[in-house]
Image (tube, grey):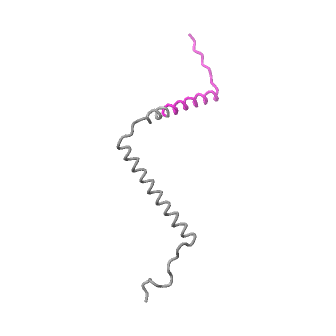
Amino acid sequence: MTIECELISRRKAFSLFGLTAAFTLAAPVTLSVLSDAEAQTAGMERRDDRREGRQDRRHTRQEGRHHRRDARRTGGTKPDTTGAGTGTK
C-alpha cells in the first residue's frame, strides 16, 4: 500500500480556500434566514416602538437644525441692533 503525494498548484489551493470560505459564510446566513420566522413578543413590539420614537425625535432635531442653518445662511431674522431692549439708558 503506497500513498502518493501530489503537489497542488497555488491556483488550486486558493480555489479550495475560497470554496471553504464560501461555505463557511453561507451556513450562518442560511441559519439566520430560518430563525427570522420567530413570533413577535410584547417586549419586541415595545422595543420597536421605542426605536421608532427615537428615530422620529432624531429626524425632528435634524430638520430643526437644517431650518436654523438655512435661516442663518439666507439672512432670516436679524437681531435688533437699535439699542432698544439692551438695558442701557
Q: In which quarter of the image is the N terminus?
A: top right
Q: Relative to the observer, which residue lies in front, 49 or 11?
A: 49
Q: Residue 75, position in %: x, y?
A: 56, 73
Q: Residue 76, position in %: x, y?
A: 54, 72
Q: Residue at x 46, y 60 (%)?
A: 61
Q: Residue 51, position in %: x, y?
A: 42, 50
Q: Quadrant of the C terminus?
A: bottom left
Name, please, the residue furthest toward the top. 1
Is residue 76 inside the magenta stretch? no
Q: In this view, does 21 lie above or below 84?
A: above
> Would you identify the image quadrant in which residue 5 lies?
top right
Position of residue 21 in the picture relative to residue 12 (left or right): left
**Residue range of the region highlighted in magenta in the rendering:** 1-28
Q: Residue at x 63, y 27 (%)?
A: 12
Q: In this view, does 13 lie above or below 80?
A: above
Position of residue 62 in the picture relative to residue 45 (left or right): right
